[in-house]
Image (tube, rainbow, N blue to C red):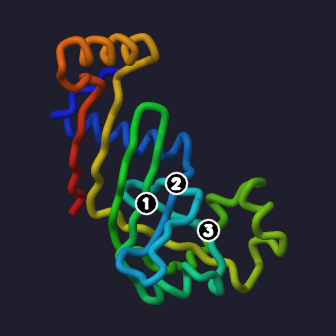
Amino acid sequence: MTIDMNDRVAVERMLWDEIERHQIGMLGVVGAAEHHTQPMTAFVDGRTLWFFTRTDTELAQRIGEGHQAIFVFQGKDLYACLTGELILSHDEARIAKYWNAVVAAWYPQGKDDPRLTMMRLDCQDAELWISDAGPMKFAWEIAVANARKHEPHLGGKANLRFH
């Protein structure tokens, strides 16, 4: 896939489309003593990501009333790191909207579980690397880069600010 890295609208559209298509990424709190990220399923709503959780999870306890967070995502031709404010948001309309068989498997008490809630990541910025290289172009670019002693040209990088 070839995309003009200077076309902010196209780059941003690709970001949200890829997250919506693949959904799974690594979510963590910035600056926390326990700084590891964990796999989470993201649901896209504009420039906001929603995640199911329980109020008694470590992550929910850590963010409290809100905290800076990072979501790292890898799609088919895209790698991204998004940051923003992560808050607990018990939004019953969102729970109903995003509830599905996969989510239900993680929450056997169902939508009425009193500990069930959601986290909302209000995305502030993103850094993306987009590859336009399939296997053949990748092999060609590696060969050319080694022969000419320069880095391969396999895509580009973009920075997006949302606020």
**Quadrant location of residue 141?**
top left
Q: Position of residue 80 (x, y in %)?
A: 37, 48
Q: Which mark is residue 25?
A: 2
Between marks 2 and 1, how big is the CA–CA gap? 6 Å
What's the amino acid at mark 2?
Gly
Q: In this rendering, would 4 be left or right of 131?
A: left
Q: Is residue 45 above or below residue 107?
A: above
N-term mark: 2 or 1: 2
As helix, strand or loop, the secondary structure at mark 2 comes to: strand
Q: Position of residue 90 (x, y in %)?
A: 57, 79
CA distance for labels 3 and 1? 14 Å
Position of residue 34 relative to residue 133, above or below, is below
Q: Residue at x 24, y 18 (%)?
A: 145
Q: Position of residue 158 (x, y in %)?
A: 22, 42
**Amino acid, disc 1:** Phe
- Residue 162 position by quadrant: bottom left
Of 139 and 69, the residue lying toward us: 139
Quarter the N terminus occupies: top left
Query: Which residue carries the number 1 mark?
Result: 71
Residue 99 tag number: none
Q: Give the mark toward the camera: 3 or 2.
A: 2
**In the rendered view, would you say 2 is above or below 54?**
above
User: What residue does disc 3 label?
Assistant: 52
Quarter residue 83 falls in: bottom left
Residue found at x 54% / y 40%: 21
